């Protein structure tokens, strides 16, 4: 069954609010139908998905998030202490679904989150250690209030382009998302998720995959200068430590060009800093939300452009294990090219203990034009080492010009994990601390000139 939104009263003129007409078409297409958006600009607040529905955006169709406070209210979540507002709510979105199966959003059209907010309150966790990166310590109270507003200010606002909670058999294919709010996609506790050939050029996070199993992200182009492009997380938003398992990310390109300029082809470089006051983001990451585990993750044939490097971070008690990274290239790297970190922020229910990182293989990994400040880092904690890491056929080329820090960086166990947390690193090429079973096979490091040593291995045993 094809349900054309115009047949249900949608005008597509970019002025009239088409929310009711779109939702009527969605209801009519339940259990196997397709909601068709023909060419036009469809202004809408919250669209509520149902089982078995396909949203098809034709070429020339734009689904635009309307301005104002007409979005569904954020639902109550008794587990909102341990992650920020954006991770803890789903219904306050342009498109949302909960407990559904067989959902498809596809086509050659565009989702424009013009009316969404990219901001949101931080977590309600009382301890507050590691809530924000150390790079934000100098920001004024006024700027922090803008970046993390009060919960009351969010009522009625749209916060995400697409939010899915505990859904199964979900496919997102071919569409373009611009200005996606806090998340272009937040998928929480979803199984059998496929993101194929998406184009995302957004003002905060791209694809956030939280506590999901059997996930494929393939052929996606994601530009996110202000936050992460593709990120796997295991927060406590669902009230459980739900592991991320069996994920394949392949053939993707991530970047940190000026917002909108990847989509228009100009690839602007005027923005230097992200909101956390480090350089632009745009990377692929595992963590920071990490109360649950991450198992069997494969990343291959991907490219990073003008972005931070690959990061694997567990700081809330979860274990990251059995990760394979191969055939990855990075160009114009804005922080560390590779960052593995075990921390003890422990933003999780009482009783959480530091987690672990083990059995990680990185092969055929090349990074060029790397910022001199931060070398590749593998950093555990005393008594909680990173274990069994293989670096094989690695080529890292640094800009040079770095100066040795006056003191050795501290452990900073409960700090937010970012390469900049330690300041300028003591080595220019590779720094490993608290690591067991490190294998370096064909690791080539080069610099334009630097007074620091090439490598520092502290409390490290070889494999």
Image (cartoon, rainbow, N blue to C red):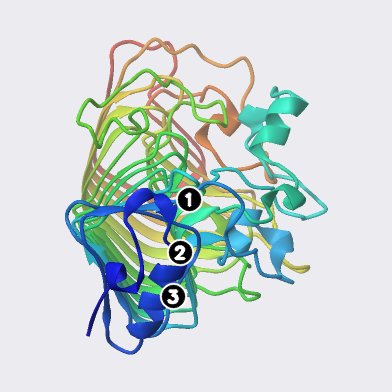
The residues tagged by marks 3 and 1 sit, at their Cα atoms, a distance apart of 27 Å
- Looking at the image, which residue is at 33% across and 90% down? 31
Quadrant (top left, top right, bottom left, bottom right) of the C terminus: bottom left
Badge 2, how many Cα within 10 Å: few under 14, some, many 20+? many
Q: Are marks 1 and 2 in contact (CB under 8 Å)?
A: yes
Residue 218: x %, y % from top left: 22, 60
Badge 1, how many Cα within 10 Å: few under 14, some, many 20+? many
Instruction: Label 1: state its secondary structure.
Output: loop
The residues tagged by marks 3 and 2 sit, at their Cα atoms, a distance apart of 26 Å
Q: Earlier in the sequence, mark 3 or mark 2?
A: 2
Instruction: Label 2: state its secondary structure.
Output: helix
* 134 vs 313: above or below: above
The label nearer to you, 3 versus 2, is 2
Residue lying at the far bottom in this picture: please name it.
Answer: 31
Residue tagged 3: 190
Badge 3, how many Cα within 10 Å: few under 14, some, many 20+? many
Q: Earlier in the sequence, mark 1 or mark 2?
A: 2
As drawn, is 241 to the left or to the right of 367?
Answer: right
Residue 251: x %, y % from top left: 18, 53
The residues tagged by marks 1 and 2 sit, at their Cα atoms, a distance apart of 9 Å
As drawn, is 87 to the left or to the right of 18?
Answer: right
Please name whichever residue, 234 or 237, is drawn nearer the observer in this view of the structure.
Answer: 237
Residue lying at the far right in this picture: please name it.
Answer: 126
Residue tagged 1: 66
Residue tagged 2: 19
Instruction: Label 3: state its secondary structure.
Output: loop
């Amino acid at each position: 069954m094809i349900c054309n939104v115009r047949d249900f009263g949608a005008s597509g003129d970019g002025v009239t609010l088409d929310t009711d007409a779109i939702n009527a078409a969605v209801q009519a297409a339940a259990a196997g139908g397709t909601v068709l958006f023909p060419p036009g600009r469809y202004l809408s607040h919250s669209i509520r998905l149902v089982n078995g529905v396909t949203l098809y955006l034709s070429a020339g169709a734009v689904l635009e998030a309307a301005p104002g406070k007409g979005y569904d209210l954020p639902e109550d979540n008794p587990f909102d202490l341990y992650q920020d507002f954006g991770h803890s709510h789903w219904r306050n979105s342009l498109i949302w679904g909960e407990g559904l199966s067989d959902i498809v959003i596809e086509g050659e059209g565009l989702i424009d989150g013009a009316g969404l907010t990219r901001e949101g309150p931080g977590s309600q966790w009382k301890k507050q250690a590691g809530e924000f990166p150390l790079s934000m310590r100098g920001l004024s109270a006024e700027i922090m209030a803008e970046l993390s507003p009060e919960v009351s200010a969010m009522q009625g606002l749209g916060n995400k382009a697409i939010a899915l909670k505990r859904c199964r058999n979900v496919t997102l294919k071919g569409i373009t998302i611009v200005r996606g709010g806090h998340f272009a996609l937040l998928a929480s506790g979803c199984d059998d998720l496929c993101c194929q050939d998406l184009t995302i050029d957004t003002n905060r996070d791209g694809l956030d995959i939280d506590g999901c199993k059997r996930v494929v992200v393939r052929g996606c182009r994601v530009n996110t200068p202000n936050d992460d492009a593709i990120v796997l997380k295991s927060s406590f938003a669902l009230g459980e430590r739900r592991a991320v398992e069996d994920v394949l990310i392949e053939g993707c390109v991530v970047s940190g060009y000026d917002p909108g300029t990847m989509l228009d082809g100009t690839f602007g470089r005027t923005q230097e800093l992200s909101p956390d006051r480090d350089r632009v983001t745009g990377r692929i990451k595992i963590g920071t939300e990490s109360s649950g585990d991450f198992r069997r993750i494969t990343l291959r044939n991907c490219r990073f452009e003008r972005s931070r490097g690959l990061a694997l971070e567990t700081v809330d008690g979860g274990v990251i294990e059995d990760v394979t990274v191969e055939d990855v290239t990075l160009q114009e790297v804005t922080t560390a090219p590779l960052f593995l970190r075990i921390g003890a922020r422990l933003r999780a229910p009482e009783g959480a203990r530091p987690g672990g990182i083990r059995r990680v293989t990185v092969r055929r990994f090349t990074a060029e034009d790397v910022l001199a400040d931060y070398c590749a880092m593998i950093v555990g904690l005393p008594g909680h080492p990173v274990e069994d890491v293989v670096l094989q056929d690695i080529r890292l080329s640094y800009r040079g010009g770095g100066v040795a820090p006056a003191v050795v960086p501290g452990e900073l166990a409960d700090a937010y994990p970012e390469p900049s947390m330690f300041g300028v690193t003591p080595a220019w090429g590779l720094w490993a601390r608290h690591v067991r079973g490190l294998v370096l096979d064909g690791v080539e490091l080069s610099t334009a000139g630097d007074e620091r040593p090439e490598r520092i291995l502290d409390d490290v045993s070889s494999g």
